[in-house]
């Protein structure tokens, strides 16, 4: 699966694709313990514009409000915690989603 993910990411595949269980491809990568590929996919959700001196984050894919057959789809953040993938906690996108959640619920 890693080779396929690498090929897709290298050729511009969307990382906001949702499967039949309403989970993102990033969630799939994390569940399959493809941490390196998940980092590459997360990088696509963080865009730096050096001309305008700003950064943009596409965080909506990380906040699923989608039901599936088992209830609600798990977010990548939930999978990171559930699978002890703590090396991803320092990723800029994960930090940004954590900030958003902190502001929303704290």
Image (cartoon, rainbow, N blue to C red):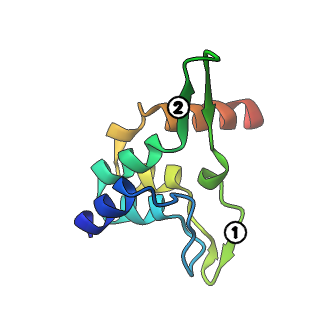
The quadrant in which residue 17 appears is bottom right
The answer to whether marks 1 and 2 mark residues whose Cβ atoms lie closer than 8 Å is no
Residue labelled with disc 2:
95
Q: Under tag 2, what secondary structure? A: helix
The quadrant in which residue 33 appears is bottom left
Query: Is residue 42 shown above or below 106?
Result: below
What's the residue at 55%, 34% (across, down)? 47
Q: Is residue 26 left or right of residue 69?
A: left
Q: Which of 81 and 96 is in front in this view?
A: 96
What label sits on residue 66 in the rendered view? 1
Of the 4 image quadrants, the one containing the N terminus is bottom left
Q: Distance between the residues labelled 1 and 2?
A: 22 Å
Q: Under tag 1, what secondary structure? A: loop
What's the residue at 43%, 34% (across, down)? 91
Q: Which of marks 1 and 2 is nearer the N terminus?
A: 1
Q: Can residue 33 be seen in this view?
A: no
What label sits on residue 96 in the rendered view? none
What's the residue at 58%, 32% (across, down)? 96
Percent of width and height locating residue 97: 60, 38
Percent of width and height locating residue 22: 60, 73
Q: Is residue 6 left or right of residue 92?
A: left
Percent of width and height locating residue 31: 37, 64
Of the 4 image quadrants, the one containing the C terminus is top right
Query: Is residue 80 shown above or below 104?
Result: below
Q: Which of 58 and 9 is in front in this view?
A: 9
What's the residue at 23%, 65% (across, down)? 3
């Amino acid at each position: 699966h890693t080779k396929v993910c690498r090929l897709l990411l290298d050729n511009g595949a969307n990382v906001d694709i949702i499967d039949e269980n309403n989970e993102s491809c990033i969630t799939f990568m994390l569940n399959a313990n493809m941490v390196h590929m998940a980092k590459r996919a997360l990088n696509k959700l963080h865009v730096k514009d050096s001309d305008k001196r700003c950064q943009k984050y596409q965080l909506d894919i990380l906040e699923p409000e989608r039901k599936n057959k088992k209830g609600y789809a798990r977010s990548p953040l939930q999978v990171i915690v559930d699978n002890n993938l703590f090396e991803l906690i320092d990723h800029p996108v994960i930090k940004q989603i954590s900030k958003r959640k902190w502001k929303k619920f704290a």
